[in-house]
Amino acid sequence: MHFQIHKWVCYAIGYVFITSGIMKLVNHDFIGIFINLGIPFPEFTLYVIAMIEVACGMLIAAGMYIKHATPPLIIIMLGALFLTKLPILANGGFLTFAFEARLDIVMLILLVIVWKNLRLK
């Protein structure tokens, strides 16, 4: 991947995950969402995921430890798709699923591209 494009993709990934993590920390509605998902220890899990999103987002945006910062975010994105978006596919149909999952899918693709690009070097 061209260096300049790679840098801007990392900035975009960092921006999304930093803002997402901060919102999970300051917006108390997310605790209810995690409780409704049936996740064990929902409040603790929420804070762990938020901290991982902020920390890994900052590392990726700074261009540091990208090889180590992308896998946790890939796992978080896969979890988000399976826990929050697949039920939409079952209940609301494909178009609703595609709309609701658009950011998750784009971020997952960008994370995989950045991670695979580093692995090839």
Image (tube, rainbow, N blue to C red):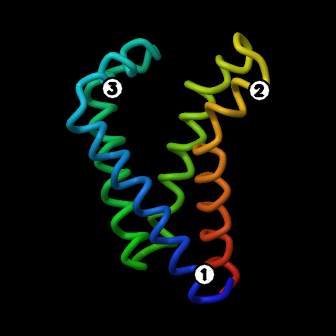
* Residue type at numbered disc 1: Ile
The quadrant of the rendering that contains the N terminus is: bottom right
The residues tagged by marks 2 and 3 sit, at their Cα atoms, a distance apart of: 25 Å
First in residue order: circle 2 vs circle 1: 1
Residue 8 location (% of width, % of height): 52, 76
First in residue order: circle 2 vs circle 3: 3
The residues tagged by marks 2 and 1 sit, at their Cα atoms, a distance apart of: 30 Å
* Residue type at numbered disc 3: Phe
- Give the left or right position of residue 49, taking residue 91 as reference: left
- Give the left or right position of residue 8, taking residue 109 as reference: left
Callout 2: 10 Å neighbours few (<14), some, many (20+)?
few
The quadrant of the rendering that contains the C terminus is: bottom right
Callout 3: 10 Å neighbours few (<14), some, many (20+)?
some
Q: Residue at x 55, y 46 (%)?
A: 75
Q: Residue at x 49, y 65 (%)?
A: 12
Tell me if residue 115 comes above or below residue 31 in the rendering: below
Q: Residue furthest toward the right?
A: 94
Q: Residue at x 70, y 10 (%)?
A: 91
Residue assigned mark 1: 5
Residue 17 location (% of width, % of height): 41, 53
Residue 25 location (% of width, % of height): 23, 38
Residue assigned mark 3: 30
Residue assigned mark 2: 95
Q: Residue 101's image quarter?
A: top right
Helix, strand or loop at disc 3? helix
